[in-house]
Amino acid sequence: MSDNSVEDSFSSDHSCSNCSPSDKVDIQIKTDNKNLVLSGLPVQDEFAPNSICFGCGPSNKDGLQLKSYRSNGGLIAEFKCEEKHQAFPGVINGGIIGSLIDCHGNWTAAMAIMDKNDWEKPQCTVTAQYEIKLKRPTPLGIKLKLNSRVLALQEDRAEVIIELKADGKTCATGRGLFVAVKEGHPAYHRWH
């Protein structure tokens, strides 16, 4: 991790001040051929099969177990909510949406940092800051689709945008700064 603190690196206009400025970026992610899956194995299963994370941990049987796949432009995922994920009848709880966006963004950053550093496996990343915008009620019973891409990238951090759609309509967007941690951080070994 660099000498800069996470708080200093994320300025008030929501762009990583240590990366390229991105305060005017349209959060809607275009869905052309970037949805092509590059690997058949979810990144969570490949790199963190023992993770207990509520949102994406493969070994957390009570969690959401989000499965994100590498694509040309970042990561993609599909998720089917259950009745227990509702805020009220027919509508998904905002906390569930936040967990999906956070985990998907975190893995997008981890993979981008891994690729930038030419590592064989990603270093564990943590969420330094993120926000979600709930654009419309997210309906139950429709497969949710998440798409993400990196806005700015350094050796140990990435700024990511995420879009969550249901039936082709954007229900929520997210933006976050995710940082790779070093040995000594409580999350350092959480994926291994």
Image (tube, rainbow, N blue to C red):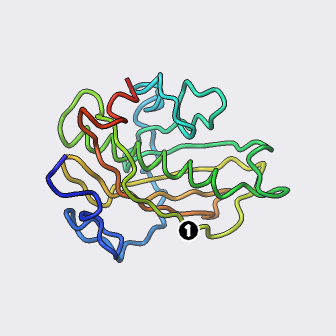
Within the image, what quadrant is residue 80 found in?
top right
Does residue 39 lie above or below 73 as drawn?
above
The residue sitting at 60% across, 64% down in the picture is 170
Q: Is residue 170 above or below residue 12?
A: above
Q: Which residue is mark 1?
A: 133
Residue at left 61%, top 67%? 134
Identified at 78% across, 43% down, the residue is 84
Question: Where residue 40 appears, x then y in whole percent?
Answer: 47, 28
Residue furthest to the left in view is: 3
- The x and y percentages for residue 102 are 49, 51
For residue 21, side relative to residue 47 (left or right):
left
Residues packed near mark 1 inside 10 Å, few (<14), some (14 to 19) or many (20 plus): some
As drawn, the residue found furthest toward the right would be: 89
Looking at numbered disc 1 in the image, what kind of residue is underneath it? Answer: Lys
Q: Is residue 71 left or right of residue 15?
A: right
Place of residue 36 in the rendered image (x, y in percent of width and height, measured from the top left)? 45, 43
Q: Position of residue 70 (x, y in %)?
A: 41, 39
- For image coordinates 54% across by 43% down, the residue present is 77
For residue 75, above or below residue 31: above
Residue 110 position (above or below residue 7) = above
Where disc 1 sits, the SS reads strand
